[in-house]
Image (tube, rainbow, N blue to C red):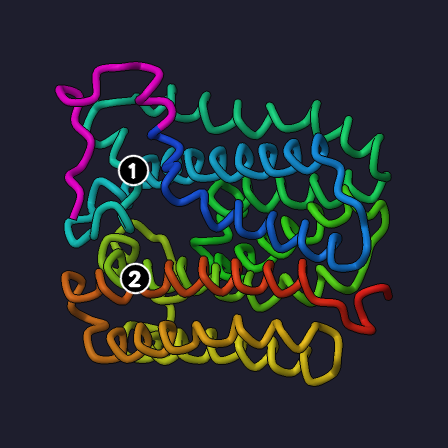
Amino acid sequence: MPTEPQPATLTSPALRVLLATRPAFLGVTLVACLIGLAAAAGSGVTLDPLTAVLSVLLALCAHAGGNVINDYHDARSGADAANTTRLYPFTGGSRFIQNGLLSEAQTARLGYGLLLAVIPTGLWLSWQAGPALVGIGLAGLFLGWAYSAPPLKLMSRGLGELAIVAVWWLVVVGTDYVQRGSVSPVPMLAGLPYALLVAAILYINQFPDHDSDAASGKRTLVVILGRDTAKWGYLMLTLIAYIALVFMIERNALPQKAAVAAFTLVLSFRAARELIAHASEPPALAGAIRLTLVAAHVHGLLLAAALAFASWPGALR
């Protein structure tokens, strides 16, 4: 496991700011953007390189801001400081505040600054693509804020998974919209199974953090259900994702080649088996968390490839 960041070994202010955004975990957003771009390309849309790149950069910036804001509010609640069973770097936050690399105030300024930074370019993209992008972008920013911040604190009310599904679904839909200039059912359908697998990452990460979350009043879904019941929820969540994908293919809403993305169910089910066996043993869950991360990324990449290079009757609807 990687070691936690320390002031003595991370002296560059610029590098501290970069790493505080947890860049290693921004891959799920990059993959979501690729699915959106692939949905547009597979529908016969000619991609515009400038707006495509800007869409990806804005989505990554918003995700980075959400990561930092989450660290700030978890520090304010005491959840991260009390977390002695964390599995760094997967759970327990970035540790930048707890280890003295950034203050709470610096973290707040960075997180909210990143969210505000996406607005000017987002408005320009809306002017280029269409007004619906304003609603998509505002909804995403709102959920990114409401996930951690009071008074809503969705993650502390057992609603974190729903927020995650909505955010990453919006990333797919929004990236497609910038290219297509209209709302299409293709990215809406393609983005749902992937967004569910991204939510599974959040869900499994709550198991090592259960005790500190409960002690700090952070009532995640795992805290509400308890580990013994919640462990079956992971299996249900991933099953719904793969069943939804197969159903859409069977209904010809997605191309037959998209079935290749279902092969990652092997990884998800292996993670589910490990979680069911070791739900109350945080050190034993590192492998299951890695499998969950790999399953989401590989699923999304395979789905993007299938959408980009396959033609099917539903593509032009």
Image side of residue 151 versus residue 127, left or right: left
Along the polypeptide, which appears first: circle 2 or circle 1? 1
State the residue in front, 177 or 75. 177
Report the residue at 53% width, 43% height from top: 151
Within-10-Å neighbours for mark 2: few <14, some 14–19, many 20+: many
**Magenta-drawn segment:** 1-18
Is 62 or 256 nearer to us in this picture? 256
Q: Residue at x 63, y 49 (%)?
A: 171
Q: Residue 134: x and y, percent?
A: 77, 38
Counting from the top left corner in percent of width and height, residue 172 is at 65, 53
Please say whether residue 184 is one of the residues in the magenta stretch.
no
Secondary structure mainly formed by the magenta segment: loop
Q: Which residue is drawn at the image coordinates 43% and 26% (left, top)? A: 108
Image-based side of 32 in relation to 79, left or right: right
Q: Which amino acid, mark 2?
A: Ile
Q: For the residues marked 2 and 1, what is the alpha-carbon distance in whole angstroms?
A: 16 Å
For residue 94, which numbered disc appears in the image?
1
In x, y percent, where is residue 93? 30, 42
Residue picked out by circle 2 = 289
Task: Give the SS element for disc 2.
Answer: helix
